[in-house]
Amino acid sequence: MVFCMKPSLAIDFMGIKLKNPVLTASGTFGYGYELADLIPLNKLGAIVTKTITLEPKSGNLQPRIAEVSSGLLNTIGLQNIGAKAFIKEPLENLSKVGVPIIVSVAGSCVKEYVQTVEILSAQDIISAIELNLSCPNLKKKIVCHDLPLTDEVIKSVKKVSKVPVIAKLSPLVTDIAELALCVQKAGANGVTLANTYPAMAIDVKTFKYKLSTVRGGVSGACVKPMSVRCVYDAYQNIDIPIVGCGGIETGEDVLEFMLAGARVVSVGSASLVSPTRLIGIMSEMEEILNERKIKDIKEVVGMLNTIKNAC
Ligand SMILES: Cc1cc2nc3c(=O)[nH]c(=O)nc-3n(C[C@H](O)[C@H](O)[C@H](O)COP(=O)(O)O)c2cc1C
């Protein structure tokens, strides 16, 4: 008998019902509605907006993006219009899209994180907050490199947030599983693994740095195996759902993250290069599930952890 039923991609994420587990990643898809003419946004699992701060930010000087082998180097510097402007036109446009909206938030101190989340989580259209704890703008260091600070940010934000809170972590830590457990203990409802990897590049034709800030973060295909490892290690240690992120370009990549333990994924650089990839990924996932006779995507989450001698 030929197995031809369309597999179900629907999945519950922190109590939010998603059509499928494919999310946009923060910062690579604008505020989330600008690409409506290029792809059917209502087919996405959810939209994660670029990071919003309390006040507008102009970001770092150009050049802020450079191509590297199998990846992208960036130093955008959290350019955004600020929370008060975001809840006007961008949010109004997002409310017409018809998929859950997750807003990424950063701050330069605990108070700023709290004030921004207070403003944003009070908006009915917002389903969750993703705390960007992996930007270097708080006291000039990456928040999640400081455990007491990470704990304080999450606990303070949780007191005011009306929606679930996801902690987005830097992969550059000694023990990602331990850090993931810390954010779970602080009250995070989910965790995103991971942000970009600290990196730099030099143009040997011009003898110049490729980024204005010299150092930046690298993303894209070159980081995928490292981010899959982050997800796998964290999955062994925590119960809250994981958003897998890093180098996802195909349906096969999504399945790889989910087998390692991600409940959903977010796609960054690949959607920046080609927004239609987000839609292509979904049909590729369906094909793989059909081939393996898996009827429901939920079965895949962490599946490899239950198969002995999987390698
Ligand atoms: C141009 C660019 C801008 C980004 N801006 C943000 C941001 O504002 N907030 C954030 O949390 N992550 C930001 N990221 C990181 C991505 O969300 C993602 O975690 C990372 O790029 C790894 O995924 P990828 O390999 O699929 O791109 C940015 C990445 C890129 C390439």
Image: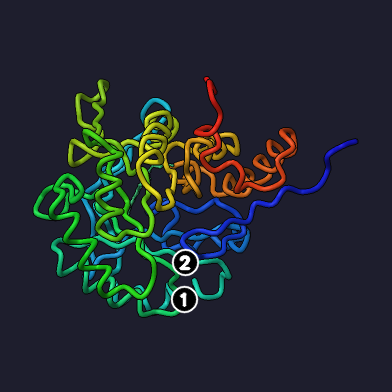
Callout 2 crowding tier (Cα within 10 Å): few <14, some 14–19, many ≥20: many
Give the distance between the C-alpha atoms of the residues marked 1 and 2, in whole angstroms.
Answer: 7 Å
Q: Horizontal placement of 137 versus 162: left or right?
A: left
At x 81%, y 47%, the residue is 5
At x 45%, y 69%, the residue is 127
| Residue 293 position within the rendered picture, expressed as x and y whole percent measured from the top left | 74, 37
Q: Nearer the viewer, residue 23 or 70?
A: 23
Q: Which mark is on residue 96? A: none
- Report the amino acid beneath label 2: Ile
Q: Quadrant of residue 131?
A: bottom left
At x 35%, y 73%, the residue is 86
Q: Is residue 166 above or below residue 146?
A: below
Q: Is residue 120 above or below residue 23?
A: below
Q: Horizontal placement of 132 versus 102: left or right?
A: left
- Report the amino acid beneath label 1: Ile
Q: Which mark is on residue 101? A: 2
Q: Horizontal placement of 19 versus 124: left or right?
A: right
Q: Which residue is labeled 1 in the image?
A: 125
